[in-house]
Image (cartoon, rainbow, N blue to C red):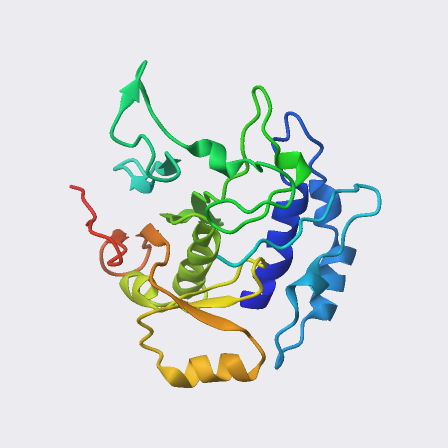
Amino acid sequence: LAESWKGPFWDHASYFGDPSFVDVPTDALLTNERIDRRAAVYRRQVATPAGLYAMPLPDHPAAAPTPPEEHGTSHLSVVDEAGNVAAITTTVNLYFGARYTAAGMVMNDEMDDFASSVGVANAFGLPGGAPNLPGPGHRPVSSMTPTIVFDAEGPVLAIGASGGSRIVTATEQVAWHTLVRGLDPYDALNHPRVHHQGFPNVLRTEETNPQGDQVLTALGARGHPRETARHSAVVQLIRVNRGEGPRLIAVSDPRKGGRPAGE
């Protein structure tokens, strides 16, 4: 999983911006040929330098961001008695203004999600590219990932998270543990997580990691530069169950105070 995140975060920094104002080359980024080239870079037993996943698009030039120096969001998942599903993520970004309103709007510092200048990192260490520079009416690029997963019969999972750039990787890991590995949703939330965002080229692991030193040692042996992080994203999910047991299984991440509610 850590290897699979390096390339998309490079694309995030180089090409993403408000599609109402900039040409985000979505189709070119997702061609099978480009995906195959990235897959060919991957080495199962050895960590690959993040820069090798870059693969800029010749027909869509974007100034590749320079790596930065090292150095309040809420998600709500809802399913009602009729089976309607919603996944909603809201944010004021960091702490500024969170206790004050003006003209009916909560004050915020969401401008940090824009690139202040090309190559300069935001509060979460993500460098900005030219497509994400601020401008009148522009929407900033965000890591918010409210997600509803469907199968042939309908929705099976409503999930999302708070936690800046860690939202993407945490949401993917918990969904993967739930839907692919078949873990109980509570166990999926409690499972230790890792995070890699390409910039810096460091694999972050949770400070409390019940997997123990064995897994972390194995990651180090594969060449992943590692550091521990005190915080992870906070994931909220509802699993729609069509088998035996409760129809809905709602779980709130124990990493943050909160609990599911419903009737």
Q: Which residue is at a point 58% across and 57% down the rendered structure image?
A: 199
Residue 92 at x, y = what percent? 37, 34
Please tell me which residue lies in front, 64 or 158.
Answer: 64
Q: Which residue is at a point 51% across and 51% down the rendered structure image?
A: 125
Residue 116 at x, y = what percent? 57, 36
Q: Residue furthest top?
A: 103
Q: Is residue 170 above or below residue 15?
A: below
Q: Which residue is at a point 40% across and 60% down the rendered structure image?
A: 174
Report the number of numbered marks. Answer: 0
Q: Residue furthest right?
A: 58
Q: Is residue 248 left or right of residue 8?
A: left
Q: Which residue is at a point 71% across and 33% down the rendered structure image?
A: 23
Q: Could you say which quadrant of the image residue 44 lies in?
A: bottom right
**Can residue 1 be seen?**
no
Residue 154 at x, y = what percent? 43, 45
Q: Is residue 69 left or right of residue 192?
A: right
**Can residue 241 be seen?**
yes
Please tell me which residue lies in front, 1 or 217.
Answer: 217
Q: Is residue 111 above or below residue 137?
A: below
Q: Is residue 120 left or right of residue 258?
A: right
Residue 75 at x, y = what percent? 34, 42
Please tell me which residue lies in front, 119 or 36.
Answer: 119
Q: Is residue 211 above or below residue 185?
A: below
Please tell me which residue lies in front, 139 or 99.
Answer: 99
Q: Could you say which quadrant of the image residue 7 lies in?
A: bottom right
